[in-house]
Amino acid sequence: MNESIEFSVGFSHGVEWGWPIGVYLLLAGISGGALIIALALRYYQKQTEETPLLKAASLVSFVTIALGMIFLVGDLEKPLYFWKILINYNFTSVMSIGVLALCLYIPLTFLIVVLVFEAWIKERLGQTPLAKLFFLFAWIKPLRPMIHLLAFIFALVVCAYTGFLISVLVRFPLLNTAILPALFVVSGLSAGTAFSSVIAAYFFKADAHHGDMKTLHTLEWPIMALEMLLLFMLFVSLIVGTNVDKDAAAAFFEGSYRHLFWVGVVGLGFSVPLVLNFFLGKTVAHSRMSFYISGMASVLGVLSLRLFILYAGQTFSA
Amino acid sequence: MEQDTKRRHFLKYLGASSLVLSTVGHSTQTQEEEKPKKPHYGMIFDQNKCVGCTECEVACKKTNAVPKKQARLYVENKTDPNTPLEKRYTRVSCQQCVDAPCVNVCPTNACYRDEKTGIVTMNTNDCIACKYCIVACPYDVRFINHETKSAENCNFCFNTNFAKNEEPACVQACKYKALVFGDLNDEASYINQLLHVKDSVRMKPSFGTQPSLRYIPIVKTGV
């Protein structure tokens, strides 16, 4: 440091955005990722029926984003005033833009759930007072292609905004990088794919090794490779950067959060699925057990990634 | 004869145009007078004069009702342990950036720049305490007030002393004149006169937020 004058204390408590935000970042990633992959597959394979994957993905995307809202509001110091964010907007704020995107995205995921489960809803709720609302199906059904397209776009926007949200924080070299939004979209795809295929296989009886599940299974590896590449790029951008950047690169090897990276991201997220699928023979790779374990390991890996980025990012500051 | 009419026309146009130009000129001049330059409030911290008595901290807390164990203003002891007799203190507080990240990121516009004075301040009623401004601040000088549950920063006593046309509490409390407050856009102000004759620096200017606080660091001259 060759500044003639400086101060080193701050008024914050180090990590101001803690685990609830980390969990929210994961849930938003799962929600967006699940919907992106399911809708992309539907477009690509020109599916018209309600596949187990679409059922699972629509349910997952709605439930995870709704849960995410609980974590997001719960992290506010004034949670009961959260409505202020809905009536005031500031378009230079990524958070404000994100809120606007969520206000459109959440109803869209709900509509998709309703459309996908139409038969189930009509069967189960036909005798309840809710049956009076069934005429609405006739209204929203013609809009379905539009709803799918908008949901696909906003799923991408939601995934990306979570990255931009923290990449604008100039004080933290690990966060203040253009790679972050891309990393969050790709890891969101990975977690969303893993979680919705587990749900599709367990609850909607999708065959874990045929059809959509098989396609997803082959897609899983390029997505993981891309995730590794982006992490590597993030690391390289730090070690070739300024002194402040170089100091922050230590987050990968020093401090208590390095375990989140090596055990959580590399161990659980990358190694467990790779070992189960490629190194223990065909019987293990094709077993239901390894399908579920590697799916959940991927999700936990992405959770570790979000927590590592958030905690280590806020610890190593300029 | 023909030349004479030409000359007459020329004189006529000259007179008319001078009339038009002078009124236009006059009107633009009055417009300038009606619209004075907006103020740009700034502060100088002179490290050469600060003795670290922290009376500014005490005055700030009292004036702005800052809860115990929290601070809008803190005097950090930056004395080099190898030269314990050469005391060095530094003011830690909001730098009142011209391009303020806290204002840019606040989703509810609770953290805002006052239209009239240009001071970055808070509307505590609209703050939902999302802490985005706290993590966005390059200087880490914002905090959630435990009592109001809203984010806060040094706003030059905007709601207290400044509203009463008085100098900020820290400036009033400083017995050593280490703090100078004033309008950087007013060429005649004392702060500007001081900046003309003294070398001053801005804290971490590489963040590019154009802070309004100026620091006059202790610089050894001679051998």
Image (cartoon, coloured by chain):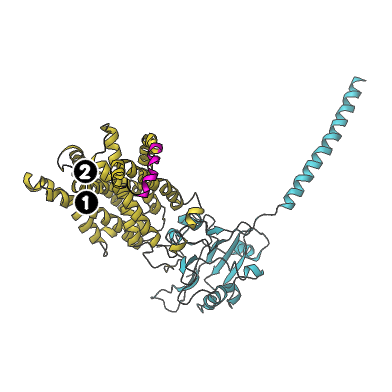
- Magenta span: predominant SS is helix
Q: Earlier in the sequence, mark 2 or mark 1?
A: 2
Q: Residue at x 31, y 53 (%)?
A: A27
Image spot of residue A234 (x, y percent): 30, 50
Farthest residue toward the front? A127
Picture quarter with the N terminus of chain A: bottom left
Instruction: Provide the secondary structure element on which disc 1 rests.
Output: helix
Label 1 neighbour load within 10 Å: few <14, some 14-19, many 20+: many
What hue does chain A carry in this figure?
Answer: yellow
> Magenta part of the protein: which range?
A125-139
What residue would you read off at disc 1?
A298
Q: Are marks 2 and 1 in contact (CB under 8 Å)?
A: yes
Q: Determine the CA span between mark 2 and mark 1.
A: 10 Å
Front position in the image: A133 or B178 = A133
Res A220 label: 2
Q: Colour of chain B?
A: cyan
Q: Position of residue A19 (x, y in %)?
A: 32, 61
